Image (tube, grey):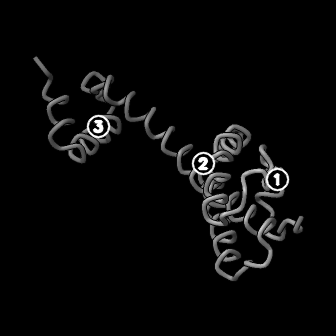
Amino acid sequence: MASISALKYEQDFQGWINQHIAWLKTGQFHELDVEHLIEELEDMGQSNIRELENRLVILIAHLLKWQFQTAQQSGSWRGSIIEQRVQILRLLRKIPSLKRELPNAVSDAHPDALNLAIKETKLSASTFPKECPYSIEQLLDEDFYPLSE
């Protein structure tokens, strides 16, 4: 039979969260639904990484378009590049431990960014580098815009 806490988790997630916060604040650790609490904490960590990767996809795609389709460079692309950098830097300030995830996040984001750039520019896949041509420092540098090929 499911515990009352587990039932509340399934029926009223926000209520479950509030109850667990109260229990943690008052030291009632024996009341905690540990199984679901672990599951939610793991998901929170993955959610932060997914957000980082999603923002990197857009940033890298726009940098690729900027570099390889120079005739189409626009304020819109520049605005997107600026916005993604602002949001990535904000995320890294709020969750500093994500900095160590950056190399893997860039590697994971690049194939999707490449696909997006190919579809949006209609350029051949051979136009673009197979690996991300930008360093993490360049990706986060507000003044970096790649030179055209």
Q: Is residue 39 left or right of residue 99?
A: left
Question: Residue 85, percent across and down?
Answer: 68, 64
The image shows residue 5 at horizontal and vertical percentages of 18, 30
Q: For the point 77% across and 70% down, which residue is it?
A: 69
**Real-space Cα separation, disc 1 to disc 2, in angstroms:** 15 Å
Q: Of helix, strand and loop, which one carries label 1?
A: loop
In the displayed structure, 74 sits above or below 28; it is below
Amino acid type indicated by mark 3: His
Quadrant (top left, top right, bottom left, bottom right) of the C terminus: bottom right
* Element type at mark 2: helix
Taking depth in this image into account, of 102 and 8 the one nearest to the observer is 102
Question: CA gap, disc 2 to disc 3?
Answer: 30 Å
Residue ID for mark 1: 134
Q: What amino acid is at disc 1?
A: Tyr
Q: Quadrant of residue 146?
A: bottom right
Residue that mark 3 sits on: 20
